[in-house]
Image (cartoon, rainbow, N blue to C red):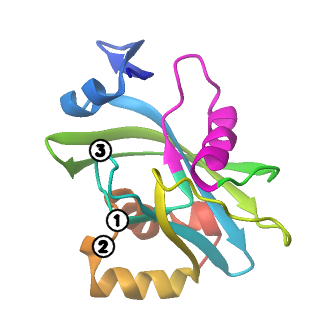
Amino acid sequence: MTQLIPAWVDGDLVPLDKLDVHRRGLRHPAVSVFLLDGDRFLIQRRALGKYHTPGLWANACCTHPRWGEAPDDCAARRLGEELGVTGIALRPRGEVEYRADVGGGMVEHERVRLFTGDWRRGLAIRPDPDEVMDWRWLSVPELRGEIAEAPERFTPWLRLYLARHSDAIFGST
């Protein structure tokens, strides 16, 4: 099934097939969500069937808005689709841009809107097994240590967010 996402071509934002956008390395909008619980945040391990970076650890969720979809609506939708989590108020935390080879001849060249949300006790995490194979909570220092030991276990964007944008996402940690 073709999924149309916005991408910039010759300065214009146009709807294109998501896989084509990644194969061509076109710049496109994206969203990334971080769920916070005090000094910990949730990371998820991408399912092995994902078309890129399968089995790697990432933030709570990240995706691309559909053509015509607002970034905040997209972030809330995808949090529900990937982790089964709904009803969390998401706060915008700025915008970043990155370009990363994600393997298989694909490149993520994303202009990302970052969102955070505070975890509420009593909520359940019910991941879609086609999207998420595992999840866990850890602190930023714990994640920094794990990335230093085995960076290949983590998505390029999570490593980049932690190295360059953790103040915007987490405050000063």
Question: Which image quadrant for residue 12?
Answer: top left
Crowd band around label 1 with a 10 angstrom C-alpha radius: few (<14), some (14–19), many (20+) = many
What residue appears at the point 27 percent right and 82 percent down from the top-left corner?
A: 150
Q: Kindly report the distance in space between the C-alpha atoms of the residues bearing marks 2 and 3.
A: 16 Å
Q: Nearer the viewer, residue 8 or 36?
A: 36
- Crowdedness near tag 2: few (<14), some (14–19) or many (≥20) residues, C-alpha within 10 Å: some
Q: CA distance from mark 1 to mark 3?
A: 12 Å
Q: Which residue is mark 2?
A: 153
N-terminal of the two: label 2 or label 3? Answer: 3
- Residue 67 colored magenta? yes
Q: Residue at x 55, y 53 (%)?
A: 128
Where is residue 153? Give x, y as percent: 30, 73
Mark 3 Cα-neighbour bin, 10 Å: few <14, some 14–19, many ≥20: few
* Residue type, mark 2 in image: Arg
Q: Residue furthest left?
A: 105
Residue 56: assigned label? 1
Query: Is 117 located above or below residue 64 in the figure?
Result: below
Residue type indicated by callout 1: Leu
- The answer for how far apart the CA atoms under marks 1 and 2 are is 5 Å
Query: Which numbered marker is on residue 129?
Result: none
Badge 3 amino acid:
Tyr
Residue range (magenta): 62-83
